[in-house]
Image (spheres, grey):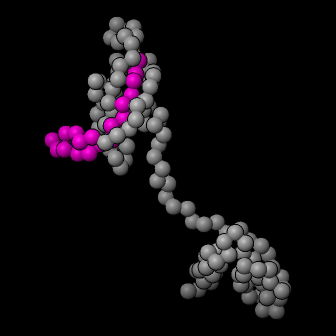
Amino acid sequence: MHGTAMTLAVVATLWCAAGWAGVYKCTDPDTGAVTFSQVPCAGESERVKVWAASARDTSRPSMEALAEQCVKEARFKDPASAEIVEIGDMGSKIITYANREIVAQRLPIKVNARNGYGGYGGATWYDCYLSRASNQVFMVVAR
């Protein structure tokens, strides 16, 4: 390893060993060589912040965001009028999609939207089926 790669390897090692104690960048006054330590050096030292590499964000969208996505895909006569009244508990269900059986996430949502005459007919429950991996809406079905 050379230069930056070696430095990063040393910092990563010290970070793991040091825990919350901190990492110090030490510079030798005679040679200018840089080393890292979990304790302040005898010569010139500077405390540095080391950030752990964060993993890819695998968090799922909120239930509200998923419900809104379902409403957009439901193709109501007046989509702008659709109001989410209630969101049920998400669960899994086997559905037929594209002529094959798959496991989908089922999100029950209660929606009040205008009908074809322009009036609200009352809130209705819909089952929104989403892919387990990508949150793609497969279909929205009225109960």
Residue at point 40% right, 22% down? 111
Residue 79 horizontal/vertical position (percent)? 40, 21
Residue at point 47% right, 34% down? 64
Q: Is residue 43 above or below residue 96?
A: below
Residue at point 27% right, 40% down? 93
Kindly indicate the quadrant of the structure image that contains residue 6: bottom right
- Going by the image, does 31 lie left or right of 54? right
The stretch in magenta equals 93-112
Q: Nearer the viewer, residue 33 or 111?
A: 111
Q: Nearer the viewer, residue 72 or 55?
A: 55
Residue 54 horizontal/vertical position (percent)? 55, 62
- Number of dots carrying numbers: 0
Residue 61 horizontal/vertical position (percent)? 47, 43
Residue at point 19% right, 39% down? 96
Q: Which of 108 and 133 is in front in this view?
A: 108
Q: Nearer the viewer, residue 39 or 57?
A: 39
Q: Split into 4 quadrants, where in the image is the C terminus?
A: top left
Q: Split into 4 quadrants, where in the image is the N terminus?
A: bottom right
- Dominant SS of magenta comes to strand
- Going by the image, does 94 lie left or right of 26? left
Residue 119 horizontal/vertical position (percent)? 39, 8
- Going by the image, does 103 lie left or right of 79? left
Whether residue 11 can be seen here: no
Question: Does the magenta run of residues contain 107?
Answer: yes
Whether residue 134 can be seen here: yes
Question: Does the magenta run of residues contain 19?
Answer: no
**Extreme-bottom residue of the structure:** 30
